[in-house]
Image (cartoon, rainbow, N blue to C red):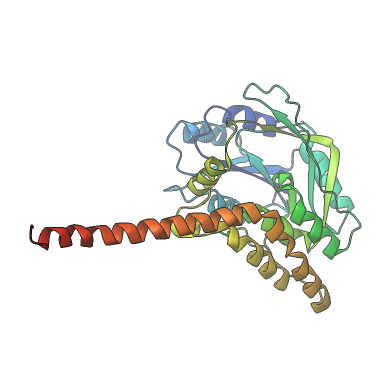
């Protein structure tokens, strides 16, 4: 069995998939497999993936029969992984050539680490570096409570790092909510350290124009979920899923209570989105009531005798 599984989630990635796979396959570290999960792309993504699978025995490719959403596609990769470690690769991103080597070394050096990742450098469509600052979450040596609290306020760049697969499988990789990645990092933080390895680089490609909050939310709905039922007040689920993560963690009861108190900060972090959810709910309710009443009014007007 390989030491590392590299999981590549792909949907209509024909523009950059070749450069991404080339970046993975020229790694100095060689004990790994690559699994490409094609989420029912309708461009040339499957042909590109199949070509690499035919020519390199380390590469496996499977295609979903329908688009199941990014979350379940990621979950499928975790289920298919055979390595001791699992690293997620975006199908349009790039790595430094020492990426796998240094991340494996970090996890093998620190038994309590559950996730290791490199520094992030933003690049444009052509691979040119962009001047965008990125913060990092290194929680080495911190208590579970401190680690959890830090992840509540941090970014999600660590999701594209290297996981200890046995620990990752203890977490809910199929949680169908907005913010599932943040909750996953919270679950992992309750189980071990996050290590930043500055000698390695994840080149994160900008593939979208700047978005408004509404545009971003619509994109999340279209990309993450196969079912509309997950769109009802989506941000209100986040704090309660954090609490559920705490209750299912290996913490002592005392620390669980403290961690649940920390979850209250999620209401502050998500306050604008949660208010927006309520406003949308009220707006939809009013529209439904109005449309429901309109036919009655029209029928009543028809039945009313003319003056």
* Residue, far left: 306
* Residue, far right: 141
Residue drawn 59% across the image and 28% down it:
18
The reply to whether residue 177 is visible in this rendering is no
Q: Quadrant of residue 188?
A: bottom right
Foreground residue among 298 and 185: 298
Residue drawn 71% across the image and 57% down it:
268
In the rendered image, residue 5, in percent from the top left (x then y), is placed at: 68, 47
In the rendered image, residue 94, in percent from the top left (x then y), is placed at: 69, 31
- Left or right of 22, for residue 196: right
Give the vertical position of 137 relative to 43 (above or below).
below
In the rendered image, residue 298, in percent from the top left (x then y), is placed at: 19, 57
Residue drawn 60% across the image and 32% down it:
210
- Left or right of 277, for residue 181: right
Foreground residue among 233 and 208: 233
Foreground residue among 137 and 258: 258
Give the vertical position of 261 relative to 95 (above or below).
below
Q: Quadrant of residue 114?
A: bottom right
- Left or right of 138, for residue 1: left
Give the vertical position of 61 relative to 15 (above or below).
below
* Residue, far front: 307
- Left or right of 23, for residue 201: right
| The C terminus lies in quadrant | bottom left
Residue drawn 81% across the image and 46% down it:
104
In the rendered image, residue 33, in percent from the top left (x then y), is placed at: 66, 43
Foreground residue among 13 and 268: 268
């Amino acid at each position: 069995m390989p030491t590392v599984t590299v999981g590549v989630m792909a949907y209509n990635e024909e523009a950059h998939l070749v450069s991404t796979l080339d970046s993975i396959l020229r790694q100095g570290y060689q004990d790994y497999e690559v699994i490409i999960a094609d989420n029912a792309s309708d461009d040339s993504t499957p042909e590109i993936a199949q070509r690499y699978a035919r020519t390199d025995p380390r590469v496996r490719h499977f295609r979903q029969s329908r688009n199941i959403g990014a979350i379940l596609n990621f979950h499928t990769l975790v289920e298919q992984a055979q390595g001791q470690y699992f690293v997620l690769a975006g199908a349009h991103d790039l790595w430094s050539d020492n990426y796998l080597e240094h991340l494996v070394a970090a996890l093998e050096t620190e038994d309590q680490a559950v996730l290791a990742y490199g520094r992030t450098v933003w690049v444009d469509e052509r691979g040119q570096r962009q001047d965008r600052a990125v913060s990092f979450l290194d929680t080495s040596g911190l208590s579970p409570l401190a680690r959890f609290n830090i992840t509540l306020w941090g970014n999600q760049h660590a999701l594209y790092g290297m996981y200890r697969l046995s620990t990752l499988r203890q977490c809910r990789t199929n949680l169908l909510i907005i913010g599932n990645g943040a909750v996953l990092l919270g679950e992992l933080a309750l189980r071990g350290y996050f290590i930043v390895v500055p000698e390695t680089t994840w080149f994160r490609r900008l593939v979208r124009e700047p978005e408004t909050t509404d545009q971003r939310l619509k994109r999340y709905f279209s990309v993450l979920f196969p079912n509309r039922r997950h769109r009802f007040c989506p941000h209100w689920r986040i704090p309660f899923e954090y609490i559920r993560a705490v209750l299912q963690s290996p913490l002592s009861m005392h620390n669980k209570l403290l961690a649940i108190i920390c979850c209250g900060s999620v209401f502050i972090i998500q306050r604008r989105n949660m208010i927006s959810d309520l406003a949308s709910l009220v707006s939809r309710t009013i529209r439904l009531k109005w449309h429901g009443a309109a036919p009655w009014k029209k029928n009543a007007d028809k039945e009313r005798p003319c003056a």
